[in-house]
Amino acid sequence: MQRAVPQDFDRVLSSMCTEPHPAARETAQQFLATNPGDPGTYQTVARLEERAVELLGEITALDDPAGYITSGGTEANIQAVRIARNYADADEPNVVVPESAHFSFRKAAEMLDVELRDVPTTDYRADVDAVADALDDQTVGIVAVAGTTEYGHVDPIPALADLAADAGALLHVDAAFGGFFLPFTDIEWNFAHAGVDTMTIDPHKAGQAAVPAGGFLARSTDYLDELTIDTPYLESESQFTLTGTRSGAGVASAVEAMETLWPEGYREQYQASMDNAHWLAERFQERGYSVVGPELPLLAADVSLELVEQLRDRGWRVTKTGSGEMRVVCMPHVTRSMLQTFVADLDWF
Ligand code: PLP
């Protein structure tokens, strides 16, 4: 049988993952056989994980960060809901999320037996009044999204943090996508801007680490205590992660990527990706399409479903939003010349 090779990225406009930075790729290969889930045995990668959390703390303006490298944004979001539920004392806990939140919160709610209260958005952002109306004495958490999956928009995080504080609930910010772009904007999203309790920020997205490397951060180790269970047969005595054996490759590559790129490399990437997203938005507008964004390097255009299918047949990996627009994510592998080819194909039909 012929050996399979991974697809290349030259027509991928749909993914929030990207090619790892070359140094991160090399480091991932070195650490393939390590397991940060057993830190007593795999001590080097355990130290690297501490460094990863320290670096994520710098990026999100959190002193003394607590957290770990997850399998992805889904795991980090599940852990956030788990903490909110366990931290509070509610018989019938609910978590309030904007309807734009990632579907991983639905998985979390089902597994954890928490009610998920979806509230409408206004202009693609959480509507603060609608969130306020949804709160009650069983609300244990509010979710704010810093870079929505469909439109790349950022919720009004300080206002949502105030609501959470008043309600005695925790505020979780899902910056899985936006976290490596937002430090270079003037948007308020991080631990210093607002009373954020926990956050998802994924090195395996715009952080340019190898998959799997999601990130979970908490303002205090007290929150991680809510997750801790005993681990009798390991050298370490307890574990707060969701999975047991974990990818040392993801952890080590996340450190390598962040050591290499934070902050200047990420700043340059943010600028290049935003320039590309604006350039593409203009090309769509010139052709009469209406465009949402880009607030972060992601835009949606009201291209017909038929045209999206034709572009897919030409090999372009593009997706539709729930409302039917074509969604394009300008991740680091997306270059201007790639977008020029894409626009030429758009014009061809
Ligand atoms: N949160 C947001 C905002 C996302 O965009 C995504 C994925 O695109 C996730 C969470 C889930 O991340 P993962 O696919 O790494 O589990």
Image (tube, rainbow, N blue to C red):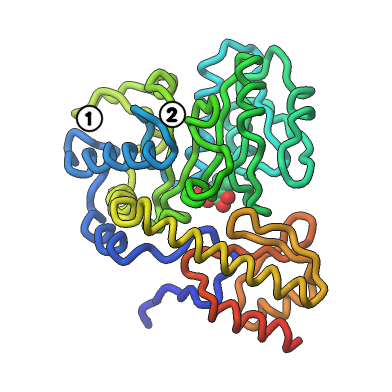
Q: Amino acid at mark 2?
A: Ala
Q: Residue at x 38, y 33 (%)?
A: 67
Task: Indicate left or right for 76 with 119 as reference.
Answer: left
In the rendered view, tell whether residue 85 sits above or below residue 302.
Answer: above
Query: Of the numbered discs in the image, which one, if any, rests on residue 185?
Result: none
Q: Amino acid at mark 1?
A: Leu
Q: Residue at x 33, y 44 (%)?
A: 246
- List the residue tagged with mark 1: 234
Residue 91 x, y percent position in the rendering: 64, 12
Task: Indicate left or right for 297 with 32 as reference.
Answer: right
The quarter holding residue 278 reads bottom right
Q: Residues within 10 Å of mark 1 (few under 14, many from 20)?
A: some
Label 2 sits on a secondary structure element that is strand
Residue 148 x, y percent position in the rendering: 63, 48
- List the residue tagged with mark 2: 218
Image quadrant occupied by the N terminus? bottom left
